[in-house]
Amino acid sequence: MEGISNREDNPGAVIIDGHGRADLGLIRALGERNVPVYLLTDDRRSPITRSRYITAILPFPSLRGEESSCVRALMQIGQQFAHRPVFFSTGDRSLMLFARHRAELEQHYRHHIGDPGLITALYDKVAFVRLGHERKLPVPFSLAPGSLDELERDADRLSFPVMVKPAEKRNWAQFPQVHRLVGGNLKGVRVESREALLRLYQDLTPYDNRIVIQNYIEGRDEEIYSLHTYIDRQGDVTGIFTGQKMRTWPIHRGIGCFQLSVIEPQVVNIGVGALRAIGYTGHAIVQVKRNPDTGSFEIFEINCRYSTWNYLHTRSGVNLPYAAYRDSLGEKQRPLPLQREGCRWIDAANDIKAFREYRRIGEWSTGAWLRTYIGSNCYAVFSWRDPMPTLAPLACQLGGAPFRLARRFGYFLVSAGKTHG
């Protein structure tokens, strides 16, 4: 591989393609601030590679393969840069890859990933249960039983229904038998009774015995909020964004497909307080849900990676990735502006599927659903400023001539997007 010439004052960002929307949001957030973006991918046909903000695309082994191969490839790529670029993580695999091998990788990459032990404790659901109890975080009551006997002894302390989650999602993903047991719900499955919980635990433990059981917080998906923040190396909060999860797919247990920018001071106070309590620095997402019985918010997860819908921060005026980039270069940042409320991030394909289920159970009417689309929207893939990740795959399906037309139309949309803001 030839050397990569980059600038010392703006060396660029390295992102590993996780084949998800989080990568695209991060690329756009950084690219709009003229940060060179180097995309590492095992799929040159990925729609993400069509983004106008990518400076270079570099071949990289699949993150689902051997970790040693990925580390070796990162080392080889890092050695090619004239100046160390900044590493960003958009998924758990790339996050844990860097955290586990930070000492050797930071010879070639700057970063804003915190203490590896703390990163692991937040990633691993069993470790997070222990951390939450130890630091007295406002989390739902949870158990991480080591055996069926232990679960039978403590099950009466739970309030049903409960959520059963794997310590690591990949532990469930590798077994088809577990897919069937949990109905494909690899993030977690709701269980209604003590008897059903004991049966499920017995069925799951031959494949994975590192399981967390958490009291389920009732309420509609609109009661779920997230704090997204960046805490710099000196421990100062650089930027804050709070979002409301209006709809998810699958409903009531999935990934947000319709998110709303909304200022919620209680979420800020709880989230920042929790991060202070554990001594966290870097980028973080604190996910909470309002308990309908008490009206208070409870934390059910803290993530150290960037979310699927991270581009909403930028469109709302709070470019957290850029703040992280400048802090990784050792620059002291001024606090970011207050977010604009009312902006929406929409994964339209999944939101349509979700709406059908919400309508079936009576939570969203057609009129109410349509009204949520009125206003300032940004989308999971499509962007006026960066249209080719949407247009190129469509054109490729139709053949060469439509691809050339889509490319020309894309250039027109880029120009039009400059006037749309």
Image: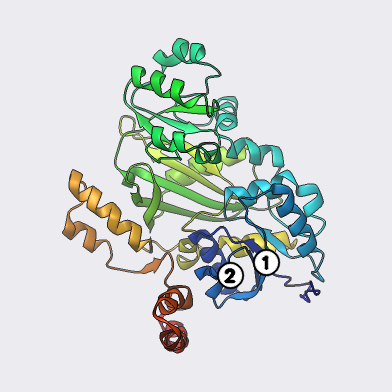
Q: Which residue is mark 1?
A: 59
Are there few (<14), some (14-19), or many (20+) residues within 10 Å of tag 1? Answer: some
Are there few (<14), some (14-19), or many (20+) residues within 10 Å of tag 2? Answer: few
Q: Which residue is mark 2?
A: 44
Residue in the foreground of this view, choosing between 37 and 259: 37
Measure the C-alpha gap from mark 1 to mark 2: 8 Å
Residue 234: x and y, percent? Answer: 71, 50
Q: Residue at x 39, y 80 (%)?
A: 398
Tell me if 39 is positioned left or right of 262 in this view. Answer: right
Residue 169: x and y, percent? Answer: 52, 40
Number of labels in the image equals: 2
Q: Residue at x 31, y 25 (%)?
A: 192
Residue contact at pointers 1 and 2, CB within 8 angstroms: yes
Quadrant showing the N terminus: bottom right
Residue type pointed to by label 1: Pro
Tell me if 108 is positioned left or right of 66 in this view. Answer: right
Tell me if 206 is positioned left or right of 97 in this view. Answer: left
Q: Residue at x 51, y 52 (%)?
A: 228
Q: Is residue 55 above or below residue 404?
A: above
Earlier in the chain: of badge 1 and badge 2, it is 2
Q: Would residue 333 be visible to someone looking at this image?
A: no
Residue 233: x and y, percent? Answer: 71, 51
Quadrant showing the C terminus: bottom left
Residue 277: x and y, percent? Answer: 61, 35
